[in-house]
Image (cartoon, rainbow, N blue to C red):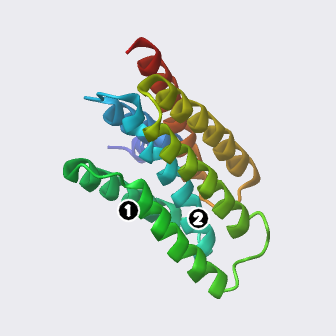
Amino acid sequence: MTQDQVRGTSRADGAARSAFGRVWPAALGVLVAAGTMIGLADARDVAPVLAASGFVYVAAAALGRPGAAWAAFGVTFVLIGVAKVADLDPTPWMIALAVVLAVVGLAAGRGRPPWSLPLQAAAMLVLAAAALLAVRADATVGGLIVAVALLGHAAWDLYHHRTRRVVSLSLAEFCCVLDVLLAVAVATFALVS
């Protein structure tokens, strides 16, 4: 292989890695949305995703590390999976964990700036309340509550992506794609079922 061929291969490999680096958060959002909808019996079953979407932001703000949102996503993923197997609502558990993280964050002096932990905690309360309300409503109304709240959170993701605050750009992008796709799927499911 000539040196020009080696350079060409390196550029092609670098371009492929660079392209993957740009699309993986959105691609993961599509995969998680599809996996969430597989076997769905009731649109309200997606409600815990609302609490999870608030939880990842609270975790990142409380710990002062944007990348911590990915670890928090992993925690919510496992918690929702375990709760599904045990036939429990994981939302109260995520609320409890968010309260613990908020206390830790406040103790560490992360109460400022106001757009960080205080605003994220308020958003978590709204999203958790929507999740709890959705599971208590009838299937159609509950599904529509989930869909509207997911669209609201998608706007939240876009804002945080644009301002580059609280969570990593990759998490904001992933979450926005996930929220929009789930909102459309859940609304459709709720109206058709």
Q: Residue at x 63, y 87 (%)?
A: 107
Picture coordinates of residue 165, whole percent (x, y): 71, 59
For label 2, the residue is 58
- Residue 75: which numbered mark, if any? 1
Residue 164 in percent (x, y) is at: 71, 56
Do residues under tags 2 and 1 come within 8 Å of each other at their CB atoms?
no
Provide the secondary structure element on which disc 2 rests. helix
Can the viewer see residue 12?
A: no
Q: Which mark is residue 171?
A: none
Give amino acid for label 1: Val
Say which residue appears at 65% left-offset and 38% top-offset. 152
Secondary structure beneath label 1: helix
CA neighbours of label 1 inside 10 A, class few (<14), some (14 to 19), many (20+): some
Q: Using the numbered discs, state the Cα–Cα distance from disc 2 to disc 1 in whole angstroms.
A: 13 Å
Depth check: give the residue in front, 8 or 44.
44
Q: Residues within 10 Å of mark 2 (few under 14, many from 20)?
A: many
Q: Is 125 left, or right, of 115 in this rendering?
A: left
Classify 53 as above or below 107: above
Residue occupying the point 47% across, 60% down: 70
Residue farthest toward the right in the current orientation of the protein: 113
- In percent of width and height, residue 175 lies at 53, 44
Residue 157 visible in image: yes
Q: In the rendered view of the protein, which quadrant contains the C terminus?
A: top left
At label 2, the amino acid type is: Val
Q: Of marks 2 and 1, which one's residue comes earlier in the chain? A: 2
Q: Is residue 88 above or below residue 121?
A: above
